[in-house]
Image (tube, rainbow, N blue to C red):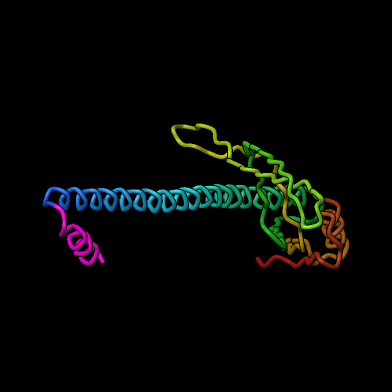
């Protein structure tokens, strides 16, 4: 295509001097170079913008998952340990191990810097009327705090998982009264129904 264009310029300039031919060719080459530069800048800009957005979303997801994993295991272990400590103090129970089952993990809600921008425009329809169009753009960015040289997301709130059931092994569970006491205590602490609490005698 470039070769044909150059030939056309040369052919058109056959009736004029060589200086005119060179000027026409130079102008065409300058326009071509400028066009290529502009296309390259626009193309790279779009790619970089998409890459930055992808990295930001990836960092937000990673931060949320990190919070969920660390806080979820801590909360669940603490509840099991607290139940074990309480149950062992009930007369006749003896040594106890508690397993709590959950329907989901903790949902960690981090704090965000939120910016909202609004654009109002008026559009005319075919019947001559006008309508107001409001476009709202919301951008969120997780707030981090420095902790021992590393950045950690600041937690706004933690939604605890729903408890589905409990399995307890106790040394005194072979006694019907002791077993009933264990079920009542776990029911009071967790709020789950008694039929979802299974108590077994611990093996020696």
Membership of 6 in magenta stretch: yes
Q: Residue furthest left?
A: 18
Foreground of the two, 89 or 53: 53
**193 above or below 42?**
below
- Left or right of 182: which side holds 58? left
- Left or right of 41: which side holds 114? right
**Which quarter of the rendered picture does the N terminus lie within?**
bottom left
Q: Residue at x 25, y 52 (%)?
A: 28
Q: Choose top left, top right, bottom left or bottom right for residue 161.
A: bottom right
Foreground of the two, 84 or 132: 132
Q: How many marks?
A: 0
**53 above or below 152?**
below
Q: Residue at x 20, y 53 (%)?
A: 25
Q: Choose top left, top right, bottom left or bottom right for residue 176.
A: bottom right
Helix, strand or loop for the magenta stretch, by majority? helix
**198 above or below 44?**
below
In percent of width and height, residue 71 lies at: 62, 47
Q: Residue at x 44, y 52 (%)?
A: 46
Q: Residue furthest front?
A: 15
Magenta stretch?
Answer: 1-16
- Left or right of 137: which side holds 187? right
Membership of 66 in magenta stretch: no
Q: Choose top left, top right, bottom left or bottom right for residue 104.
A: bottom right
Foreground of the two, 1 or 162: 1
In percent of width and height, residue 78 lies at: 67, 47
């Amino acid at each position: 295509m470039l070769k044909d264009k150059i030939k056309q310029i040369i052919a058109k300039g056959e009736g004029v001097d060589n200086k005119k031919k060179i000027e026409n060719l130079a102008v065409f080459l300058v326009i071509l170079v400028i066009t290529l530069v502009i296309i390259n800048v626009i193309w790279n800009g779009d790619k970089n913008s998409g890459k930055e957005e992808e990295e930001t979303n990836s960092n937000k997801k990673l931060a949320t998952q990190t919070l969920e994993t660390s806080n979820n295991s801590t909360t669940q272990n603490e509840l099991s340990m607290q139940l074990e400590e309480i149950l062992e103090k009930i007369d006749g129970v003896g040594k106890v191990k508690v397993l709590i089952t959950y329907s989901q993990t903790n949902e960690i809600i981090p704090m965000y810097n939120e910016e909202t921008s609004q654009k109002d425009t008026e559009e005319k329809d075919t019947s001559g009327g006008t309508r107001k169009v409001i476009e709202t753009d919301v951008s969120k960015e997780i707030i981090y705090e420095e902790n021992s040289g590393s950045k950690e997301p600041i937690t706004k709130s933690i939604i605890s998982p729903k408890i589905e059931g409990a399995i307890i092994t106790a040394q005194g569970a072979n006694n019907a009264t002791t077993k009933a006491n264990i079920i009542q205590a776990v029911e009071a602490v967790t709020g789950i129904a008694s039929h979802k609490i299974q108590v077994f005698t611990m093996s020696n």
